[in-house]
Image (tube, rainbow, N blue to C red):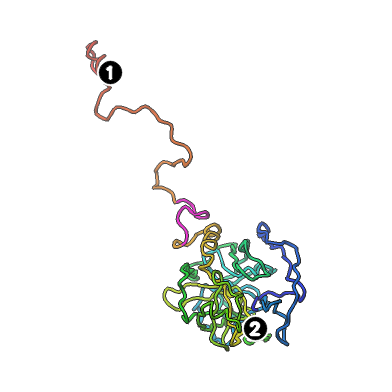
């Protein structure tokens, strides 16, 4: 499988407290070690769990090419995992990356090293899906808050797909990342990698000679090419998205048995499967929530002020009623009666 974080041979990595204001997000099983029997399915690593369910320790792009500079300004590089910018200060990744000790990310990075680019930010809050359990690799979603917004003219966020009918069978999709270039490889590219793969329906992916029912269609999907092209070590948490306009993120790099194997394509968390949960987190965390996701009354989005000079409206109390004055240009009837009786000018 293609988790990007490192796992012990005997235990899933324990929760590492997040620095810089993120300690209020308490993950499931905090500080608890969960033991698994390791079932080695290859001579090069021990990433596979019992019953062939593999926790990805790393993921990467296999069989890809250098992405053009600036082609994917929404890509976020994060210390061996990936993520996507979904609001000016909110990113989306995989819950299995939550043990990462570093909070530093780079938004919009397409090259590293001396000629590196992108905007550096710091994670201040991590929110994993409440149903995520590493033992099942299901509900592999995590939304995170950044310490300050980026310029969305330079780094426009990617839109999220909410339709379960997307993608269609065999539709071409693109997945990107900075992971290693070959299965079991140690070298990583200095340029962001991209590769095109095709959507595979879950019944096909769940055949006995493939994942045999481990792919949960509501929250997962498969994509591959019959071998040779895939995401893998170093790519977990990164986006997979449509090539049609407008580009929409439909999945998150999650897991798989090995990398780029003919019968075992990559498995991705389906964005539409938990769209409402993802949307709620973004609308709660974002300083400026995306218009297509959040209305003006969403948490995190201030109620717009009224016109200058207009009175402030109280949402909880009705204003105190005062006596209604006589219409302009008319005298009070009782006052007019007194004027007539006493012969005075009114």
Q: How far apart are marks 1 and 2 (CA)?
A: 95 Å
Q: In which quarter of the image is residue 206?
A: bottom right
User: Which residue is nearer to you in this view: 43 or 286?
Assistant: 43
Chief secondary structure of the magenta portion = loop
Is 220 displayed left or right of 49 in the figure? Answer: left
Looking at the image, the residue that sits furthest to the front is 208
Residue at 66% in and 78% down: 58
Q: Quadrant of the N terminus?
A: bottom right
Residue marked by disc 1: 335
307, above or below 319, in the image: below
Magenta residue span: 293-303
Check disc 1 and report its element: helix, strand or loop: helix
Camera sees residue 11 = yes
Question: x, y (%) of residue 13?
Answer: 73, 70
Residue 220's disc is: none
Question: x, y (%) of residue 127?
Answer: 62, 62
Question: x, y (%) of residue 320?
Answer: 43, 31
Check disc 2 and report its element: helix, strand or loop: loop
In the rendered image, residue 247 lying in the magenta stretch gets the answer no
Q: Quadrant of residue 8?
A: bottom right
Residue marked by disc 2: 258
């Amino acid at each position: 499988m293609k988790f990007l974080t490192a796992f012990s041979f005997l235990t899933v990595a324990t929760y590492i407290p997040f620095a810089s204001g993120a300690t209020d997000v308490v993950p499931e099983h905090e500080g608890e070690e969960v033991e698994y029997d390791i079932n080695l399915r290859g001579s090069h690593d021990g990433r596979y769990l019992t019953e062939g369910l593999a926790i990805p320790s790393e993921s990467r792009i296999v069989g890809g090419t250098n992405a053009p500079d600036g082609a994917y300004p929404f890509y976020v590089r994060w210390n061996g995992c990936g993520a996507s910018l979904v609001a000016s200060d909110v990113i989306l990744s995989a819950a299995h990356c939550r043990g990462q000790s570093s909070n530093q990310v780079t938004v919009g990075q397409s090259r590293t090293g001396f000629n590196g680019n992108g905007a550096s930010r710091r994670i201040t809050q991590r929110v994993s899906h409440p149903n995520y359990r590493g033992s099942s690799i299901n509900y592999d979603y995590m939304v995170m808050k950044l310490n300050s917004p980026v310029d969305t003219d330079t780094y426009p966020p990617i839109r999220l797909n909410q339709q379960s009918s997307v993608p269609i069978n065999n539709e071409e999709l693109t997945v990107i990342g900075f992971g290693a270039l070959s299965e079991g490889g140690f070298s990583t590219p200095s340029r962001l990698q991209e590769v095109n793969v095709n959507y595979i329906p879950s019944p096909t992916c769940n055949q006995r000679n493939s994942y045999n029912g481990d792919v949960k269609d509501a929250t997962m999907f498969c994509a591959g090419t019959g071998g040779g092209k895939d995401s893998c070590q170093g790519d977990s948490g990164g986006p997979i998205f449509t090539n049609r306009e407008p580009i929409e993120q439909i999945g998150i790099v999650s897991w798989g048995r090995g990398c780029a194997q003919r019968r075992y394509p990559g498995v991705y968390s389906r964005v539409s499967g938990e769209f409402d949960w993802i949307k709620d987190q973004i609308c709660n965390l974002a300083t400026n929530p995306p218009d297509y996701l959040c209305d003006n009354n969403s948490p995190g989005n201030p109620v717009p002020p009224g016109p200058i000079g207009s009175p402030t409206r109280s949402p909880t109390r009705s204003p105190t009623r005062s006596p209604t004055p006589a219409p302009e240009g008319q005298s009070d009837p009782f006052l007019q009666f007194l004027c007539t009786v006493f012969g005075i000018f009114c």
